[in-house]
Amino acid sequence: MEVSDEELNGLGMTLKQIIDDNLQNPKVKEKVAKLKGSLVLRERQSGISAVIIFNEGEVGIRNDALEKPTAFIEAGFLELADISSGRLGPIKALLTGKIKAKGNLIKLLGMSQVLISRR
Amino acid sequence: MAVLYPSNEWCQEWKKAINGSEGIAEAGRNWGTDFNGNWLFEVTPGGGLDKTTYLYLEAKAGKCTDSRLIEDPTEVEAGFFCTGPYESFKPVVKGEKDFIEGVVRGVFKLKGDMTKIMLNARFIRAVANSLSTFESEFLGE
């Protein structure tokens, strides 16, 4: 990851720990190696955002949103938690309106893999 | 009768509130069963609190087994550590602000296995919500 802990907001810190953990899994690492783009996540209640940047194997996380990310998700913390813990699939979350998404949805589904725990 | 936050009496009331909630028992049934689910809260001065205060909460399988103030944070082993100013904890204890939102905003710094937090987010929210189910009084008010 390219940003130190001290610089990240609480959402970014939370995501960073989850992504670091998930990248230990070779299957996730393999999927990430092909991805290039950015995913903005906004937590609905607080309005706090973090952006995950994918650059063919390198994954970085920063505070705040980008103007034109590859994909964008807005969700409440509990929905993010459900997706991250594997209880709620990202496709189902989209179809049932539990999360809002914009941008390249195919890439979004690929990028969201770094957020889903394999433990 | 209102109990002073923070105090050992307050910790006991919190323990009672947690153990009296069916929602917490259900949401937290897997919490701490195969990992250290205990919490250490570091409340930093301000808003009437004049010295850093540590609250320890032992939680396992949806129940609280111990809750007390401690002098030395090294005397306990907690899987989760949360630090924040007294002024920011007050509205959470009053039920005016959401603990998870405070974590997302970075008002409270949380250390521990975030995968466990995500897996048990409803338990965390329910435990935080239990803070306002009994009457508290506060320093500096």
Image (cartoon, rainbow, N blue to C red):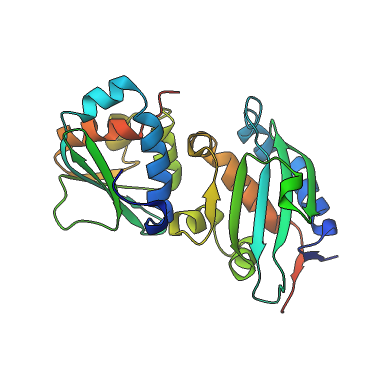
Quarter the C terminus of chain A occupies: top left
- Image check: B91 left or right of B2? left
Q: Name the residue: 65% across, 29% down.
A: B29
Inspect this view and state whether residue A89 appears.
yes
- Image check: A100 left or right of A70? right
- Image check: A87 left or right of B128? left
A59 or B60, nearer to the observer: A59
- Image check: B4 left or right of A116? right
User: Residue A27: x and y, percent?
Assistant: 29, 20
On screen, B54 above or below B75? below
User: Residue A22: x and y, percent?
Assistant: 37, 30
Q: Name the residue: 22% across, 25% down.
A: A31
B83 or A42, nearer to the observer: B83
The quadrant holding residue A29 is: top left
The quadrant holding residue B54 is: bottom right
Quarter the N terminus of chain A occupies: top left
A6 or B61, nearer to the observer: A6
On screen, B140 above or below A36? below
Q: Name the residue: 31% across, 41% down.
A: A97
The outermost residue toward the bottom is: B141
